[in-house]
Image (cartoon, rainbow, N blue to C red):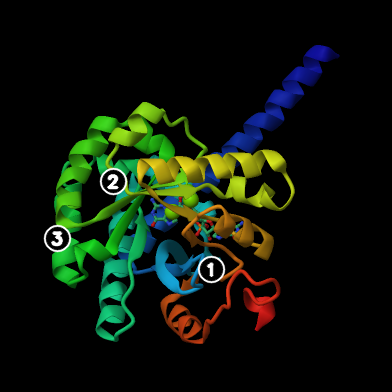
Amino acid sequence: AKKVGGNALRFYADVENTMHARERLQIEADLRRALLEDQITVFYQPKVDCNSGSVVGAEALARWNHPTRGLLSPGYFIDVAEETGLIIGLGEIVLRMACRQGKTWLDEGRGMPLAVNVSVRQLDQPGFTDQVLQILKETGFPADQLELEVTETVAMANPEITQSTTQPLREAGVRFAIDDFGTGYSSLAYLQKLPFDTFKIDRSFIWGLGSEDSNRLIVQTILAMAQSLNFDVVAEGVETVEQQQFLRDNGCATAQGYLFSAPMAADVFAKWRDDFSCSHCVPGTCGPAAK
Ligand code: C2E
Ligand code: MG
Ligand code: MG
Ligand code: MG
């Protein structure tokens, strides 16, 4: 009976894997078309100064206007994009759209720095540096207004690639951030040598801030370390006033999260920014609920 049970389990597992594989193939095929047919769009999420409450920038985040499934977040397609290499084309599209949008906002007198996520597959491309410089030139977006976000695991796993790729871009003024900081295994010795300007504290550490002492200590430690290593810090996933206050009180300069806004389409972002005023960090006055 045991044996039969085992086989039955294996049978169902196989069915599931097959369906899974088929779905991934479908996503891949759809995504391939999406890149050609302008179905990729970019949403923007504000970064807010913890002390003044002013908007100090935004992160550009990929969205997919799927013809039948509607607007899709990266959770649906980013893994497939990474595995198939489609992330290279997707990343280029997002970077170009963000720089174009950034230039438009700049010309309208509402300029601000924009951050764009970069995959290891892009960094591995020999032509990546030139591509970024070319897009900056073509769009007219100033290099010193662009920040590229690289996840911690990637930054740490490929120090040589990271170094040679980032060097010419940094000389041009582009900044680099370590995304999801705290989830990788950063060596302190490396950190100081790596060509990065900003830590983005992973949101898993921010969630617990309201209650868990351990996360408070970790975040305090990251903030202290960033200060002594001369890194800027952005806290991601800030959802409550309590979290925001804790961050501000412990010297975190910048916060990003649903407390202020979820990512928005460019036109929605522009309107939101015009309306946004936050006598920040004072309980009850933050975020949409206070409006
Ligand atoms: P990320 O770079 O760490 O971006 C932050 C993610 O956290 C975004 O998810 C954002 O919507 C979400 N988020 C922001 N504030 C909050 C909050 O207060 N609470 C919660 N629960 N979530 C919050 P999104 O847009 O779904 O993107 C997920 C990930 O996909 C990104 O994580 C990034 O790693 C990747 N990604 C997105 N766009 C691109 C892209 O153009 N290129 C590459 N390579 N990766 C991208
Ligand atoms: Mg990011
Ligand atoms: Mg992140
Ligand atoms: Mg991430």
Q: Which residue is mark 3?
A: 134
Cβ atoms under marks 1 and 2 closer than 8 Å: no
Residue 41 falls left or right of residue 16:
left
Q: CA distance from mark 3 to mark 2?
A: 15 Å
Q: Amino acid at mark 3?
A: Gln
Q: Which residue is mark 1?
A: 68
Q: Which residue is mark 2?
A: 122
The quadrant in which residue 37 appears is bottom left
The correct choice, above or below, for 178 with respect to 138 in the image is above
Q: Give the residue displayed 61% in from the left and 69% down from the top.
A: 281
Nearer to me, 16 or 143: 143
Confirm whether residue 181 shows in the render. Answer: no
Cβ atoms under marks 3 and 1 closer than 8 Å: no
Q: CA distance from mark 3 to mark 1?
A: 34 Å
Kindly tell me whether mark 2's CB lies below 8 Å from ligand 1. Answer: yes
Q: Amino acid at mark 2?
A: Gln
The correct choice, above or below, for 258 with respect to 289 in the image is above
